[in-house]
Image (cartoon, rainbow, N blue to C red):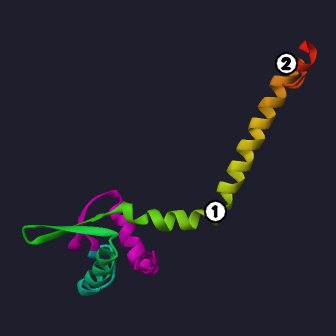
Amino acid sequence: MDEIAGAIADPVRRRILELLRERRLTAGRIAEQFELSRPAISRHLRVLRESGLVRDTVVGRERRYELDPTRFGDLTRWLAQFDQAERWERRLDALETEVHRTRRERRTGGSPNSFEERTA
């Protein structure tokens, strides 16, 4: 996970990942999107490749890069613990369940235990 976090720490590498999210691209096409030298882009691509976030395929004289989203799993799970929206979503789901239970009880005339009380 540290290797992945280090790889995505650089804004240029994050932008490369965004570009590769849509489709495979050659190193040349990626380099066209930046005001950096091709060797600099190659170094960024090497870091991404070594971290496992991208993989490359050689086709003729071109090297095509594509995203490998499977490597984001551990980092995503770790980051999720800080996601307040997820906590609120669980709480709101629990509230929704309670509201539906209360409405059902009102329609049926009481608590789930009231049926047992009337028949005992």
Q: Is residue 14 magenta?
A: yes
State left or right for residue 53 relative to residue 8. Answer: left
Q: How many marks?
A: 2
Query: Which mark is drawn over residue 107?
Result: 2
Tell me if label 1 and label 2 are in contact, CB under 8 Å: no
Say which of 65 and 116 sits in front.
116
State left or right for residue 5 relative to residue 88. Answer: left
Quick one: label 1 or label 2, which is nearer the N terminus? 1
Span of residues in magenta: 1-30
Query: Which mark is drawn over residue 83?
Result: 1
Q: Label 1 crowding class (10 Å Cα cut-off): few <14, some 14-19, many 20+? A: few
Q: Element under label 2?
A: helix
Q: Position of residue 107 (x, y in %)?
A: 85, 18
* Res 95 → quadrant: top right
Residue 82 higher or lower than 90, as above or below: below
Residue type at mark 1? Asp
Q: Pick the quarter of the image with the C terminus.
A: top right
Q: Residue at x 90, y 21 (%)?
A: 114
Q: Element under label 1?
A: loop
Residue 94 higher or lower than 106, as above or below: below
State left or right for residue 77 relative to residue 97. Answer: left
